[in-house]
Amino acid sequence: MLLLATRLGMRSGDIAGLTFDEINFDGNSIHIVQEKTLQPQELPLLPEIKDALKNYIENARPTDNDERCIFLRQNAPYQGITTSAIRFVTTRYFQKAGIDISDKKHGLHTFRSSLASSMVNNQVPYDVVRKVLGHTDPNAIKHYAKVDIERLREYAIEVPTPSGVFEAFLNGGRSYAGL
């Protein structure tokens, strides 16, 4: 679940609702209709995600059921996992990692935001980031993409050395009102 969010930026509702019909293991792709936007989206089934899904299906997913959803509750009745359960799992892994989450946003959506910021900071074009996240509104990416300080420094203009009247003012020689 966490890899789907961190590597593909999938929303918790889409992860909870993910079915076997939507995953093409042979074609290495995931085809979903986003729960939030109702827009179809094709995502790559990256090797690490493919391996993790196969491992979960073969070793951890309850087998005595006919549930279409991939991710199931671990206790009977074996129904599809909820977004609340995903939030619980996410919180548990933050805590296991020793990350202080008190008074901080720490849901699955933070991984989506982190992916978007990372892509923007690595100069991936906004249209590509928007497509990966499945946004239809071109302005929606602004909510997620936070450009880091180092990237901003690359584009900052150099401040000229003060001279003349301004230099005198900075050195306490004249009042600004006299300019």
Image (cartoon, rainbow, N blue to C red):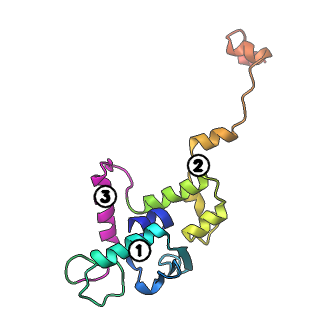
Q: Residue at x 38, y 74 (%)?
A: 53
Find out whether the residues at labels 1 and 2 contact each other: C-beta distance under 8 Å.
Answer: no
**Of the residues under marks 1 and 2, which one precedes in the sequence?**
1
Q: Which residues are magenta?
A: 78-106
**Of the residues under marks 3 and 2, which one precedes in the sequence?**
3
- Residue designated by label 2: 147
- The three-letter amino acid code for the residue at tag 3 is Tyr
**Of the residues under marks 3 and 1, which one precedes in the sequence?**
1
Q: How much space separates mark 3 and mark 2, taking CA atoms?
A: 26 Å
Tell me where residue 141 appears, x and y as whole percent. Answer: 59, 61
Relative to 66, residue 144 above or below? above
Tell me where residue 168 appears, x and y as whole percent. Answer: 74, 12
Q: Residue at x 72, y 35 (%)?
A: 157
State the residue lying farthest toward the left. Answer: 76
Q: Residue at x 26, y 84 (%)?
A: 63
Q: Visible in this render: residue 175?
A: no
- Residue designated by label 1: 15
